[in-house]
Image (spheres, rainbow, N blue to C red):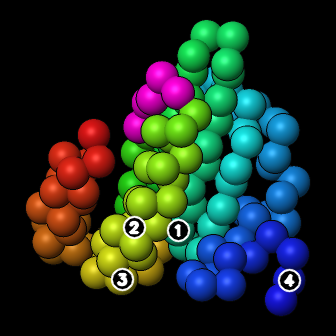
Amino acid sequence: MREGMDADTGWSDYEGGVTLGGMGGQGGTIVRDEGLHGLLRLTYEADDSRSFHVVTCGISGWLVHPRFFDNAADALHAFESMKPALEELGAKLPEGGPRSPADGRAAGPLLAAFRVRYS
């Protein structure tokens, strides 16, 4: 098995781990950054000096959704627990984003339900 790959789910270090230690989109240091099939992504950023922990999940062309936490344990639990839900949502959406207005309208309730569940 390749280093950085989760044997159970297929999630692996995003871009081979080159993003680790860099600044994330929410202003913290990237501690974990994993992707699945080049379409799904989970990024965990932290800055302990300000009790800042954020998990951002993404589906290429559809979703970028950050969740904020005040401690690492809760953020890391969320990171792992969101993987199956993100996979399930990604499987219901056309790859790469909407191809028509109808795609966008059909995806709206699915995306909203995910955001509400993980807000």
Q: Residues within 10 Å of mark 1 (few under 14, many from 20)?
A: many
Q: Residue at x 55, y 72 (%)?
A: 39
Q: Are marks 1 and 2 in contact (CB under 8 Å)?
A: yes
The disc label shown at residue 91, or none: 3
For marks 4 and 2, give the CA distance.
Answer: 23 Å
**Is residue 87 rendered to the left or right of residue 26?**
left
- The quarter of the image holding the N terminus is bottom right
Q: Say whether disc 4 or disc 3 marks the residue closer to the N-terminus.
A: 4
Extreme residue in the bottom direction? 1
**Residue interval drawn in magenta:** 67-71
Tag 2 residue: 86
Q: Secondary structure at mark 1?
A: strand
Q: Say whether disc 1 or disc 2 marks the residue closer to the N-terminus.
A: 1
Q: Secondary structure at mark 2?
A: helix
* Displayed quadrant of residue 6: bottom right
Q: Say whether disc 4 or disc 2 marks the residue closer to the N-terminus.
A: 4
